[in-house]
Amino acid sequence: MSTSAGGLIIRQEEPRNLEFPFDRLDSYLTPVESFYIRSHFHAPTIQPDSYRLTMDGAVKNPFAITLKELKSLPGKTIVATLECAGNSRVFLVPQRPGAQWELGAVGNAEWTGVPLATLLDRAGLNRNAREVVLEGADRGLPAELPRPPEAISYSRSVPLDKALDDVLVAYAMNGSDLPQDHGFPVRAIVPGHYGMASVKWLTHVRVLEEQFQGYWQTIDYGFWDEVGGIPVRRPLSEMRIKSEIARPSTFEVLPKGRTYTIYGAAWCGTGDVVSVELTTDGGRSWANAKFLDPIRPHGWRRWNYDWEIPDRPGRFTLKSRAKNTVGESQPDEFNERYFSYVVNHTLPIEVVVQ
């Protein structure tokens, strides 16, 4: 396993796909230098003085706005957890294509920017507006088949009601300008949705009157649903409820007969996480963990649990299981409809006691 200069685990050097070593989790906000990096193409270099964000499509007053003008508008700061839709893919058997993320393609940060609703209000929506496409400056040919016939920009759409609710056009992360790998100078933040929706290097917002059918909306970042017994393709959207054990790490050796504090985090896209349970015997019994953070919309909650390690050597399988306010609980098994995404089932962390 190789690491970057900042200590992130390298999953791909170019384009840069780097993972946070999740066993280092120790703060509510993930430091910028530790936040995972997910890129589809090379990170574009955008000069702030020449930057423009274009607003057009099914609107009455299309316009383009500079970075200076954007920052002069009334701003907002939110906390939001971003998780790559393929996080924890390494746990899938058999192995699936894509970056073999372990536990650290996730992070929790403070984002500052302008509500997308402010810009949409200025543009004036047409009566039949339905979806809002977010397009970045990064461009190229996708790695996965089937590929489009020519290079395309990375783009995703969100439903109009979500765009008007809490989507942020962000220019700062944890109180500082966005780094290049995180979308400088401007990116979208779509709270509660998987990270692929939070388009980096945002340069174009297009309002549509029909359903968006872009590559990353249909071919990639999609899953199979069913309508009337017929399989249909749908885009991934809200993060599913999930908890992860940060410490101990897989195959860590622990001394028998001691007390060990198991530590982790839990999050979800809809509702709030209200409980986390731990099993240290492979699921035969469960006990409640203690939260370290209060409920904050769209932010994760860290938790811990003091485990009295048995006074006998052997291998033990640890799992955590979260529940939220809308009645969701982590499943025991992976849902094959997602193929290589939404790995939110209870993940086994095997440790050795000696």
Image (cartoon, helix red, strand yellow):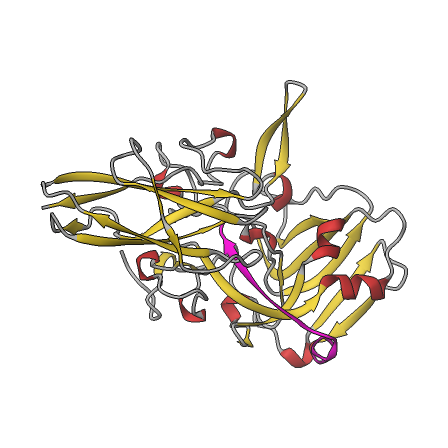
Q: In the image, what residue occupies the spot 20% across and 39% down?
A: 316
Q: How many marks?
A: 0
Task: Assign the N terminus to one quadrant of the image.
Answer: bottom left
| 212 sits to left or right of 341 | right
Q: In the image, what residue occupies the spot 26% across and 40% down?
A: 280
x, y (%) of residue 309? Answer: 17, 46
| 240 sits to left or right of 99 | right
Q: Nearer the viewer, residue 154 or 131?
A: 131
Q: In which image quadrant can residue 352 be found?
A: top left
x, y (%) of residue 207? Answer: 79, 53
Q: Nearer the viewer, residue 191 or 56?
A: 191
Q: Is residue 185 above or below residue 25?
A: below
Which segment did they paint magenta?
Answer: 68-84
Q: Is residue 7 above or below residue 206?
A: below
Q: Nearer the viewer, residue 324 or 131?
A: 324
Q: Is residue 311 above or below residue 117?
A: above
Q: Nearer the viewer, residue 278 or 189?
A: 278
| 268 sits to left or right of 95 | right
| 257 sits to left or right of 132 | left
Q: Is residue 342 above or below residue 101?
A: above
Q: Is residue 76 magenta?
A: yes
Q: In the image, what residue occupies the spot 50% across and 67% down?
A: 181
Q: In which image quadrant can residue 277 be found?
A: top left
x, y (%) of residue 227? Answer: 67, 24
Furthest residue in direction top, as rendered: 229
Q: Is residue 52 magenta?
A: no
Q: Is residue 103 visible?
A: no
Q: Is residue 132 visible?
A: yes
Q: In the image, what residue occupies the spot 52% across and 71% down?
A: 180
x, y (%) of residue 279? Answer: 30, 39
